[in-house]
Image (cartoon, helix red, strand yellow):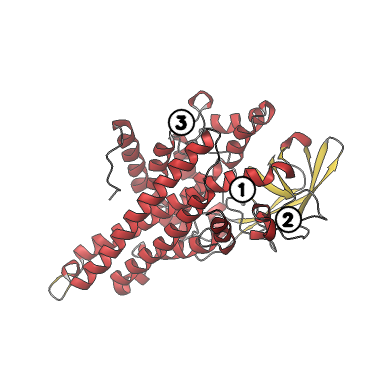
């Protein structure tokens, strides 16, 4: 099932078909297997997660952005969407790992600083074995949405963050921690790090730095034991007087709000895309099951009430396709051309698609009946993943306030 396409080239159709094969043959079985492991086993060096990341990197799926001259695939926003949505259909958690792995490299490219690009972007885009994995470390144990206060002055909380930076000559020194919700945190080699620059100011008085996570003073907390999205490792990061060169602070407070507007526009559009893949996965599994499961002497697909629920699911998935794809293509095109993206569109896509994925996954479990509660069928995992997605990256009240203020 796909959104009706009249504007795809033959190359794009082939690109999507290749991503679909990889999702079906590798990501779906690996995602199910990883979901059943303990958090420690997920991040162990012999984990199937690292095998999948290596395979994905070999196919370029960790380097969808970036021009071909430096090792990226140089794909258009639409082509990147087609690949990402297919991968999320296979496993939303593993796709989350791949989606976030390039975070530090993408930020390095946008910095325009040759030294930063050489240190953080070029090695990543030249890496074909998945050994370099980035993360976005923003949330703190006591500060989630507070870290985005710069987006709206009236919501900018005056408080000392749990990770602060102080200037020391030609260096910055980082002290504190990030929360257990840092996606890729337990396995990341590099980070894009949001850090407060003025501990006596507001949470929005922050900057963004890039760093390797093998520096002295950096340590990783244990992986979080979660209800859903168990194939996406999340965990704390600790910083004990970690020293970085001044130029690694790629954004200071004066440019922080504008950059976060752009970054959130891209990130939230990405969440809408992967939520669409999850919704499609749940719908297609339910549709196949309803055509095979016999009750009352005929496949349950032939019962009117079942068809009504399937049609509701179909309508939601098609709506997700249309909204998430248009928003992704529009906002990434704006960003790549140096124009301002529309953050409210990305937040709208993220909220709608995560809610839709939860409804579709819930209906999929119900249509499976008792079988939907067992691990024999993947819809049980899809529902847990969809639930987790709405909490971690979905209907965030703070972000909806930001979006409403931009209307």
Sequence-wise first label, 2 or 1: 1
Say which residue label 1 marks: 136
Q: Residue 124 falls in which quadrant of the image?
A: top right
Circle 3: element type: loop
Q: Is residue 41 visible?
A: yes
10 Å crowding of disc 2: few (<14), some (14-19), many (20+): many
Up-down relation of residue 363 to residue 389 (above or below): below
For the residue pair 88 and 10, the one nearer the viewer reads as 10
Disc 3/disc 1 C-alpha distance (Å): 22 Å
Q: Residue 107 falls in which quadrant of the image?
A: top right
For the residue pair 396 and 186, the one nearer the viewer reads as 396
Circle 2: element type: loop
10 Å crowding of disc 3: few (<14), some (14-19), many (20+): some
* Residue depicted at x 52% and y 45%: 266
10 Å crowding of disc 1: few (<14), some (14-19), many (20+): many
Sequence-wise first label, 3 or 2: 3
Sequence-wise first label, 3 or 1: 3
Q: Residue 290 falls in which quadrant of the image?
A: bottom left
Say which residue label 2 marks: 203
For the residue pair 185 and 80, the one nearer the viewer reads as 80
Disc 2/disc 1 C-alpha distance (Å): 17 Å
Q: Residue furthest toward the bottom? A: 296
Q: Residue furthest toward the front? A: 407
Q: Is residue 213 visible?
A: no
Q: Is residue 188 left or right of residue 168?
A: left
Up-down relation of residue 98 to residue 366 (above or below): above
How far across and how far down the image is residue 59, in percent?
A: 43, 35
């Amino acid at each position: 099932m796909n959104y009706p396409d009249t504007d795809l080239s033959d190359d794009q159709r082939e690109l999507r078909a290749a991503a679909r094969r990889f999702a079906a043959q590798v990501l779906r079985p690996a995602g199910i297997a990883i979901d059943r492991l303990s958090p420690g086993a997920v991040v162990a060096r012999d984990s199937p997660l690292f095998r999948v990341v290596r395979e994905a990197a070999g196919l370029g799926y960790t380097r969808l952005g970036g021009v071909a001259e430096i090792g990226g695939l140089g794909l258009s926003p639409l082509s990147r969407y087609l690949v990402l949505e297919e991968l999320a259909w296979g496993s939303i958690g593993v796709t989350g790992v791949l989606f976030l792995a390039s975070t530090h490299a993408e930020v390095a490219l946008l910095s325009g600083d040759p030294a930063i690009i050489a240190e953080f972007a070029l090695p990543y885009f030249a890496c074909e074995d998945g050994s370099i994995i980035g993360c976005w470390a923003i949330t703190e144990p006591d500060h989630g949405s507070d870290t985005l206060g710069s987006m709206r002055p009236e919501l900018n909380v005056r408080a000392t963050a749990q990770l602060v930076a102080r200037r020391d000559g030609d260096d910055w020194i980082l002290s504190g921690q990030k929360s257990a919700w840092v996606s890729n945190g337990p396995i990341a080699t590099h980070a894009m790090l949001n850090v407060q620059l003025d501990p006596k100011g507001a949470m929005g008085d922050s900057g963004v730095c890039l760093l390797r996570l093998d520096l002295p003073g950096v340590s990783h907390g244990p992986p979080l034991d979660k209800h859903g999205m168990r194939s996406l490792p999340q965990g704390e990061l600790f910083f004990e007087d970690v020293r970085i060169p001044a130029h690694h602070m790629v954004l200071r407070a004066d440019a922080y709000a504008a950059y976060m507007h752009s970054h959130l526009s891209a990130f939230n559009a990405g969440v809408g895309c992967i939520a669409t893949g999850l919704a499609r996965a749940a719908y297609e599994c339910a549709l196949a099951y309803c055509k095979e499961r016999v009750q009352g002497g005929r496949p349950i697909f032939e019962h009117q009430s079942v068809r009504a629920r399937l049609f509701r699911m179909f309508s939601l998935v098609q709506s997700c396709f249309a909204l998430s794809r248009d928003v992704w293509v529009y906002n990434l095109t704006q960003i790549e051309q140096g124009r301002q993206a529309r953050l409210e569109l990305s937040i709208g896509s993220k909220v709608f698609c995560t809610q839709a994925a939860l409804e579709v996954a819930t209906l999929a479990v119900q249509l499976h009946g008792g079988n939907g509660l067992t691990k024999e069928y993947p819809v049980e995992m899809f529902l847990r993943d969809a639930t987790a997605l709405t909490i971690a990256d979905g209907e965030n009240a703070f972000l909806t306030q930001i979006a409403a203020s931009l209307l």
